Image (cartoon, rainbow, N blue to C red):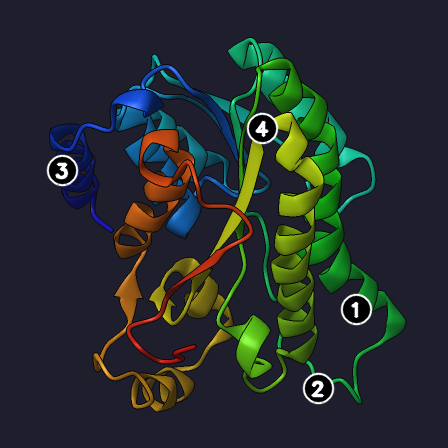
Amino acid sequence: MAPDAKKGETAMWEQIRIGDLDGKRVLVTGGSTGIGAAVAAALAAQGARVAVHYNESGAAAQAVQAQAPGRIVLVQGDMGSGGTAQRVVDEAADALGGLDGLINNAGGMLGRVPTTEATPEHFDRVLDLNAKSVWQATAAAHPHLKAAGGGFVINTTSVAARNGGGGGAVLYAAAKGFVSTLTRGQAKEFVADGIRVNAVAPGLIQTPFHDRYTSPQAMAAQRATIPMGREGTAEECVGAFLFLASGILSGYVTGQVIEVNGGQLMP
């Protein structure tokens, strides 16, 4: 997306005020591009203080920070590497003075590989990044959220968690299935601490994820299955995240997965 378009999206969220997000301290993992970047910028536009985690996309992370330099800090780390999730969460909490919310958005397919051709090493890489890191980051954030008197966790799962994923994406889909189940389980586990746990399940969204892993032909085939007849945008996912982050809007919502898929898969 062009810089002017990004400014326009940020300005849109500045016009919509969700009062209880002002001043919230939120870590967004995978926050430098795509859905994570759009959510981080929108939270900052609401007055939240946001720690944007990134791995290799340093320039993109700096571009997100430039949209609200006084409200966004950057934290770097490979979430698929052991111990990194704990460090990223603790650095974010130190930089923000605590945490009120965690958005587990870091993830990636790491290549399209059929299950019969996948190596144990590939299996571990996919599950470490897309499943294990979500569990580790949430466990690391829990004491910070509890110390704040409660808060929220929002996980990014996927339509793939329900439909099994496309060609070569079964392990990724299985990891997202873990995330959806973890969401429901931890919602019950954390309720006594005042921590709500929910998830957003994007469908076919125009992001660097599909630029990297999905051919134009595969994109066209998937597009044909969507009743709305097109891919979504990262910005069209933002509203679901803001809704779940706001106690005013969703204070009685926990253990839920909000589908953002243009009707591609309905309950």
Disc 2: CA contacts within 10 A as few (<14), some (14-19) or many (>=20):
some
Which of the labelled discs sits on residue 22, or is there none?
none
- Total labels: the figure holds 4
Dividing the picture into quadrants, the one containing residue 39 is top left
Nearer the N terminus, badge 3 or badge 4?
Answer: 3
Amino acid type, residue under disc 4 in the picture: Gly
Amino acid type, residue under disc 2 in the picture: Pro
State if disc 3 and disc 2 touch (CB < 8 Å): no
Amino acid type, residue under disc 3 in the picture: Met
The residue singled out by tag 2 in the image is 114
Q: Is residue 49 left or right of residue 236?
A: right
The residue that appears at 54% across and 84% down in the rendered structure is: 166
Q: Secondary structure at mark 4?
A: loop
Nearer the N terminus, badge 2 or badge 1?
Answer: 2
Q: Is residue 171 visible?
A: yes
Distance CA(mark 2)–CA(mark 1): 11 Å
The residue singled out by tag 3 in the image is 12
State if disc 2 and disc 4 touch (CB < 8 Å): no
Nearer the N terminus, badge 1 or badge 3?
Answer: 3
Q: Secondary structure at mark 3?
A: helix
Q: Residue furthest top?
A: 97
The residue singled out by tag 4 in the image is 194
Distance CA(mark 3)–CA(mark 4): 31 Å
Dividing the picture into quadrants, the one containing residue 135 is top right
Of marks 3 and 4, the one in the foreground: 4
